[in-house]
Amino acid sequence: MMRYWLIDSNVLVSSFNEAEEQHSYSKALLELAATGKVNACIAQQNLLEFMATVPVSNGSKNLLR
């Protein structure tokens, strides 16, 4: 039976924010998942939470606005 890891929105946020203590670990996990070395998935809810949390530089408060 193949196992998959669910990538939480906290992992997404910390991989995006270099100031986060867990940044390097989160980024490494996403890179492993992207290269297929770790079986992982991201739920739609986690993507929405990430988009609502991370500010953008285009004047919007977050990626959803």
Image (cartoon, rainbow, N blue to C red):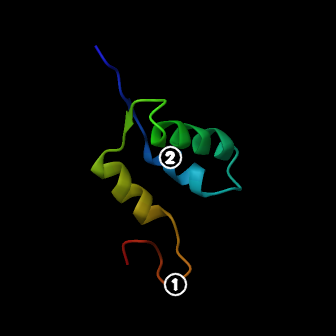
Relative placement, left or right, of 44 versus 29 is left
Say which residue label 2 marks: 10
Which is in the foreground here, disc 2 or disc 1?
A: 1
The 10 Å Cα crowd at callout 2, few under 14, some 14 to 19, many 20 or more, is: some
Is 59 placed above or below 44 here?
below
Examine the image and state in which quarter residue 2 appears. Answer: top left
Residue sitting at 50 percent across and 50 percent down?
12
Is 29 placed above or below 57 here?
above
Residue 49's label in the rendered image is: none
Q: Position of residue 23 (x, y in %)?
A: 65, 47
Q: Position of residue 60 (x, y in %)?
A: 47, 82
Instruction: Residue type at mark 1: give it.
Output: Asn
Examine the image and state in which quarter residue 49 appears. Answer: bottom left
Residue sitting at 70 percent across and 45 percent down?
21
Say which residue label 1 marks: 58
Q: Position of residue 1 (x, y in %)?
A: 28, 13
Is 4 placed above or below 63 here?
above
Instruction: Residue type at mark 2: give it.
Output: Asn
Q: Position of residue 36 (x, y in %)?
A: 44, 34
**Could you tell me which secondary element the residue under label 2 belongs to?**
helix
